[in-house]
Amino acid sequence: MRAVMPPFDSSFGEIDAASASTSQGASAAGQADTCLAVSARPLRDERGAIRGGVIAFRDINERKRNQALMEAQASELARAKERAEQESRYKSQFLANMSHEFRTPLNAIIGFSELLDEQTMGPLNERQKEFVGYVMQGGKHLLALINDILDLSKVEAGRMQLSSEWVSAEQLVEDVRQTVRPLADKQSIMLSFKVAEGLPRFFADPMRLKQILYNLISNGIKFNHRHGKVSVEVQEQEGALRMDIADSGIGIREEDLARLFREFERIEHRGPKPEGTGLGLALTKRLVELHNGTIQVSSNPVWAPPSP
Ligand SMILES: Nc1ncnc2c1ncn2[C@@H]1O[C@H](COP(=O)(O)OP(=O)(O)OP(=O)(O)O)[C@@H](O)[C@H]1O
Ligand SMILES: [Mg+2]
């Protein structure tokens, strides 16, 4: 046993014994070092002269072991974080490269099938027109999916840059209205838009704002009944832009609301399953948050299916 002790007459008192380790023939016996905390106190006579001393040893092995464990856990955590960040960088890089590789041929597929569909290259019979329609639809669906995945991975990697400018809410709503009208007409959905009068311009990324509005309105159309209704209200609230999108559709059960904004989550509804991937709302939420906004949802399901 070896204890490192200060000389008696110099620094009596509690000693930080981190260095006062003792070894009980450790190397020979193959045992671990024993750590002891040592405190020493002088014993004085009535004139204050030192007559002796009290030395106390405290076993601090447990404390040392816990400390070592905590240090090991902290460095394992730091390594795991570094690994996760590295993997996320690889994933974003991979997705960015892949999306470029996908987009180029997809644009050709969509562009040429549109040309065929317009019949400028010659007439198509009914079946040919039907098949070209499937090619075009499939191509557009894939392109939208790839764009969403790329956007999400950009946000996750913190590389999504907003191109903000002063935006007119009326113009924004008008642009989105033109885009969603064909979707609504297809399902005979009635669209109503109400923009508060005299709204000031808002500093935001117009392309991303349109994406937010489009995602929410297209959901309202998709998860609706024929001849249903989707209404959009835009107003100012405490200096911010507030957009309310409501629909008369199938609704969402209370217990499903929390899943809505997670990637690839699609809720089971009765009836035919509309097209989609479950990325729209996850991306919408992130885009809203990038603008320092919040998104909320409430629903009164009318004929949602019973819990499984
Ligand atoms: N207005 C709504 N009414 C009822 N259910 C909805 C509504 N909006 C979203 N949901 C439910 O939430 C799920 C997630 O919506 P989200 O927009 O993320 O995905 P999606 O529309 O299915 O696919 P994507 O938007 O990627 O094309 C939907 O699949 C649907 O089940
Ligand atoms: Mg959607």
Image: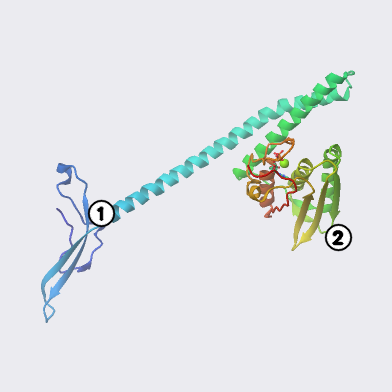
Q: Position of residue 140 (x, y in %)?
A: 75, 31
Location of residue 145 (image quadrant): top right
Left or right for 20, reference 53: right
Q: Is residue 280 or residue 169 the one in the foreground?
A: 280
Judging by the rendered image, the residue that carries numbered circle 1 is: 61
Vertical order, 132 against 51 (above or below): above
Q: Position of residue 159 (x, y in %)?
A: 62, 44
**How would you rate the neighbour count of disc 1 (Cα within 10 Å): few for under 14, some for 14-19, many for 20 or more?**
some
Label 2 element class: loop
Where does the C terminus fall, quadrant-wise? top right
Residue type, numbered disc 2 = Gly
Q: Position of residue 186 (x, y in %)?
A: 85, 37
Residue type, numbered disc 1 = Asn
**How would you rate the neighbour count of disc 2 (Cα within 10 Å): few for under 14, some for 14-19, many for 20 or more?**
few
Q: Is residue 168 visible?
A: no
Left or right for 282, reference 176: left
Q: Is residue 112 or residue 160 the one in the foreground?
A: 112
Any mark on residue 198, and which?
2
